[in-house]
Image (cartoon, rainbow, N blue to C red):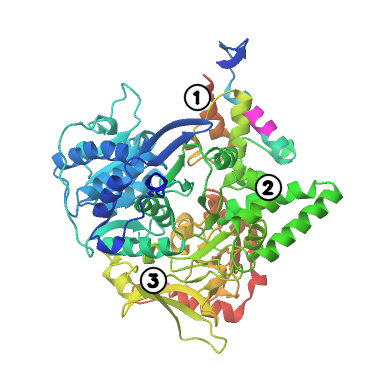
Amino acid sequence: MPWLAPLQIPTMLDLRQYESLGAALGDALDRFAGEVCLIEADRDRENHRLTYRQFREQALPVAAALERRGFGAGNRAAILMSNQSKWLVSAYAALYRGGVVVPLDYKLTAPEQAELLRHSRAEALFIEYPIWRALHQGSGFAGVEPGAIFVTEAPPGADLGGARRWEDSPAGVEAHFVARRRQDWAGIVYSSGTGGRPKGCILTHENYLEQCRSLTDWYPFRPGVRYLSILPTNHAIDFMVGFIGPFVCGATVVHLRTLRPEYIRDAFPRYRITYASVVPLLLKNVERSLRARFAELPPARRRMLDFLIGLNRALTQGRPRPRLSRLLLPQIHRSFGGHLLALIVGGAFTEPATLQFFYDLGIPVANGYGLTEASTAITVNDLRPFRADTVGKPLPGVEIRIADPEPGGIGEVMARGKTVMAGYLDDPELTAETIVDGWLRTGDLGWLDPQGHLHLVGRKKNMIVTEGGKNVYPEDIERAFEDLPAKEFCVFAANYLWPRHELGGETLVIIVRPEPGAANLDGLRKEIADRNRRLADFKRVSGVLAWEPEFPRTASLKIKRPELARQIAQRAGRDAVIAL
Amino acid sequence: MRRTQFFGYNVTTPMPSRSLDEITAEILDLAARQFRVPRAELSAGDDFFKKLGIDSLQALDLLTRLEQHFHIELPDYELQGVSDFRTLAERIQARVE
């Protein structure tokens, strides 16, 4: 009976046949033409929806405008805007012309953004008006010509100083596709990005295509899947899970222009969200409010809820069962929209108790581990079965080994595979230190268990990662204390000085050699506290340690940090640190 | 201007104009109540993350509360780089007028 033929849902692209992101995305725009690819909302209003066909119609004029400027193979286009449709459209336009996308963090200060713009030597810039205004009034655009700056949503009548309006890209002008090969650069993605020594990870088309292939192997998307994009798209996770991944599968990405907790909460039922990526901070907030709600229940209902949660946990030990969980715990699932299959968390350490809490409710949190240097993810939990205590197994195509393991099996995690970056931009020295014989040195400490799951236990590197997923390097923080009235000072990650085999709760400590004859430490402590206050909250040092001996230095007078750290650890413990 | 509904029609009424000091004081009152910090401990130049003991998500909650109080909309980018009450008050004053 032909009229009962099964509904033909177009399947996701086979990425093995593509040489570049531009080529893969182009085919996706064709194959899924009638499907909705983007929904953009602001508060409780929906701004617009775009089908894949409409996405192409928006992107080609932008690509044509780039082409008219001579933008082509290998040219770099920076993007500096909050999550929105135009971000992805701009990125595709650049890739269509064979360009290299340079996603920049819209939350950085204007000077920091200008610094990265300069470092990347971007030749074009896609930027939203409020950010353009701040840069224009401050540090400027570091050599990007005004005619190559596309400003979105500029108010009518605004004087853009020669920069163009993104919306004015002419329709009807043909744009020519520029083919690229797998080894060509597709993106320059900045790791810490807080100044000092910018680490621009060069990611090739192969890196992205292979990463996408392995992730969609375990977490397939398809038309009808709706991904809520909260994490900034300049970040490695959202670029993959909130752009490339959904697009090659014909799924929908939902952007919220206003990221308040109540709008995020409302988006889940309103848009029937299937997946969302979050940082541990957000997850803990949601856990906190759910626990508060449970605590308010009358005792009998509380007992019933606990029983149902326990039952759900028992029945999902082997794998998630979303339909069953929704039956057992309907109210909780309704508040998440009723369609949520999983939350994806990354960027920083997540406590096992939090992961277990959500899993027991029938909301699996796919915990993973990765570095921008390895595209997006090195390991991910495949939820078969769910493990709260690990960061998962290596993704298909990724090899992991533990370097120089101690008797307990703990050592530095090394990764190899087609998702390891090509190197750091303009920094062959750092690249050579980081990728050795094809193996990426992650700088994180861990061990592999017999099931092949990776456990992370600490950081070898002198850095911290906040709950919001921000990398903070002590060397960058030192600049805030440059004029400190002390003989010498140095900032360390506390865990680097006194390693403890657990993650989370990472802090920075400032080591100070007071001026000889300094009366008391109190005055110095106040000086430190004053400078501390000028830093963004997540960059602040939490304690000070007074130190007498001279810092060991190299011939060029740089502090020998590992040596100093060793000396400190030998003579003093954490309890010697005075809290600020 | 304040927008309200009156028998289904949107009506705008002018809000009394406030000085920066008044706006700052209202923000401090509201923040003290919302995060249960003694009002006397807060002042205009304070870092609200540290003084209120809040993170960036809770700061957005505060923003929503302030929007409701002042009957304005504050886009997220207005909070970019802001961490003290006085600067927040300036951003709000610009939208109230």
Residue A564, percent from left and from top:
49, 76
**Residue for point 77% across, 57% down:** A306
Question: What distance separates the C-alpha of mark 1 from that of mark 3?
Answer: 47 Å
Report whether mark 2 lies on the same chain as mark 3: yes
Depth check, mark 1 against mark 3: the one in front is: 1
Q: Looking at numbered disc 3 in the image, what kind of residue is underneath it? A: Lys
Closer to us: A576 or A138: A138
Closer to us: A122 or A375: A375
Q: Looking at numbered disc 2 in the image, what kind of residue is underneath it? A: Pro
10 Å crowding of disc 3: few (<14), some (14-19), many (20+)? few
Residue at label 1? B94
Looking at the image, is A290 positioned above or below residue A45?
A: below
**Residue A312 as seen in the image, left or right of residue A438:** right
Task: State the image quarter where residue A209 is shown.
Answer: bottom left
Looking at the image, is A567 positioned above or below residue A209?
A: below
Q: Looking at numbered disc 1 in the image, what kind of residue is underneath it? A: Ala
Depth check, mark 2 against mark 1: the one in front is: 2
Q: Secondary structure at mark 1?
A: helix
Looking at the image, is A314 positioned above or below residue A166?
A: below
Residue A289 is one of the magenta-drawn residues: no
Q: Secondary structure at mark 2?
A: helix
Q: Chain of mark 2?
A: A
Residue at label 3? A558
Residue at label 2? A330
Report whether mark 1 lies on the same chain as mark 3: no
**Residue for point 64% across, 58% down:** A522
Depth check, mark 2 against mark 3: the one in front is: 2
Closer to us: A67 or A245: A245
Residue A239, percent from left and from top:
39, 53
Where does the magenta region start and end? Answer: B24-30
